[in-house]
Structure formats: C-alpha cells, structure tokens
Image (cartoon, rainbow, N blue to C red):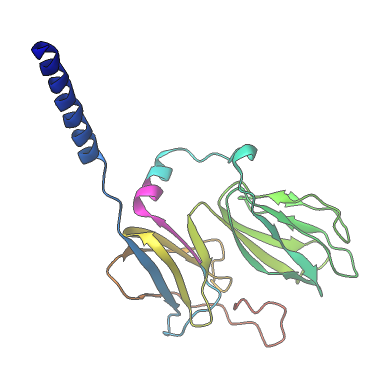
Amino acid sequence: MKRTTGKASLSLRALLVAIVSCLRAVPSPAHAATLSLVVLTKSGQPLPGAVITAETQSSQGAASAAAPAPVPARTTPSLKVIVDQVDLAFVPDVSVIPVGASVSFPNSDAVSHQVYSFSSARRFQLPLYRGKQHAPVVFDQPGIVTLGCNIHDNMLAYVIVTKAPYFGRTDARGAFAVPAVPEGSYRIEIWHPRFKDSTAPLVRTVNVGDGGEISLKLDQDLKPAPLKGHPHSWDY
C-alpha cells in the first residue's frame, strides 16, 4: 500500500511539473494599443482620402519568405463590394478590399458601358452592357487595379487589393485609426490617386504602443486636385 501511494504521489508531482512547464512555455499575450496615423502633404496639409494598409513587420516578413500564390476560391472572404456606374462615373471611384473579395459592377446609367482593367494584379473585361448583366469579379492578387471604360475615356476608378489585416482611408483631417492592435513595428503603405506614380505606394515603418498620433508627411508633390464639379474629387 505504501509503495502504491508513493508511486501515485510521484506521478502526480511529475504531472504538475509538466503542466507548469507548459504554462511557462506559452507566450504572454501582446499588449493592445491604438494605431493612430495622420497623413500630411509635402506642404504639411492634411491629405483626405489616402489609402492606408498596415501589417506587422513579422507577418510581412513571413509572407515575403514564401512565393506569392493566388488565394483558392474556397478560402476567399465573403465580402462583396459594389462599384456602380452613375452619370458617366464609377461610384465609388476608389475601393479598398482584402485579397479574395469580389466586386460587382452594375450599370445604373442610361447608357451602356464596357468596364476593363489591364492592371497586372487583375486583368478583365466586361463586354458592353447596361443593368446587372455580369457576374462579380474576384480579386485574388494584391495590388493596385485601375479601372476604365472602353466607351468613355474620362471614366476612371481604382481598386486597391491588400493582404494586410488593417486597411482603410484617411478622413477629412488626414487621420486613420485602428483600436486594439498588438503593440510592435508595423509596415504602413500609403497611396492616393493624386500620386504622380499611381502604381507605387509610399512605404513607412511605425512603432505602435508609444502613444499618441503618428504624423506621416509625404516627400513627393501631388498632381493638381480636380476642379470643383469634376466627377473625381478623390477626397472622402
């Protein structure tokens, strides 16, 4: 009886030691903070409507270590975006979506349109149509996609496709914020339709967790803003 009790006690101690060791091996959760940015032009003015994507440096590095591949259809997000055509303009004219999302292109105009993209991130063409005659287009590669209409050359829009977990656009004062993100180093990409090179975002690295709003000032001049009444204001 004593031997059995001794063995049971030994096994229990061993089990407790193993549990404690496992608990010590589990990393403590990262502290949460607010990713708060404000984007300024080269002259120091707020830049509304700028596209912002943000991802941790560690996730960005892990992603770059593997060769890029299309997202399988079964894993694509359920997000469905609509880019309509109204008064000979795309509405909205800038959209930010995650990789794998689909976009519908209804035509609410009284005239027909032929939507197309020659961008490497997503090439497609929707033959001349009115109403809702075409299936949604799936965007399965990250990048900047420029949209046009073969019938109306003045029609222009952009779809920014990103694999980053945090994305959006700056508000009227050039601000962008995401609450409760893990503290650490983040890769930030900034893009705006008025960039002289509309195919290349501006890349910055910021540290989240130090507190306060982080100012990101552009080091390049912008193309002139559209005149009042132009279908593309680019500011949201």
Q: Is residue 218 above or below residue 203?
A: below
Q: Is residue 228 visible?
A: yes
From the viewer's perspective, tell me whether residue 77 is left or right of residue 181: right
Locate residue 211, reporting x and y percent.
Answer: 29, 72
- Tell me the quadrant of the picture where the C terminus can be found: bottom right
Q: Is residue 195 above or below residue 42?
A: above
Q: Residue at x 79, y 67 (%)?
A: 85
Residue 56 falls within the magenta-colored stretch: yes
Locate residue 91, reporting x and y percent.
Answer: 72, 70
Q: Residue furthest front?
A: 1
Looking at the picture, tell me which residue is in the foreground, 159 or 32: 32
Looking at the picture, tell me which residue is in the foreground, 92 or 25: 25
Q: Which residues are magenta?
A: 52-61
Q: Could you say which quadrant of the image residue 148 lies in?
A: bottom right
Q: Residue at x 64, y 54 (%)?
A: 79
From the viewer's perspective, tell me whether residue 127 is left or right of residue 104: right
- Tell me the quadrant of the picture where the N terminus can be found: top left
Locate residue 63, reporting x and y percent.
Answer: 43, 44
Q: Could you say which quadrant of the image residue 9 lies in?
A: top left
Residue 115 falls within the magenta-colored stretch: no
Q: Is residue 218 visible?
A: no
Looking at the picture, tell me which residue is in the foreground, 125 or 71: 71
From the viewer's perspective, tell me whether residue 25 is left or right of residue 113: left
Instruction: Tally the numbered discs.
Output: 0
Looking at the picture, tell me which residue is in the foreground, 112 or 1: 1
Locate residue 27, reporting x and y percent.
Answer: 26, 45
Q: Residue at x 14, y 13 (%)?
A: 4
Q: Residue furthest bottom?
A: 228
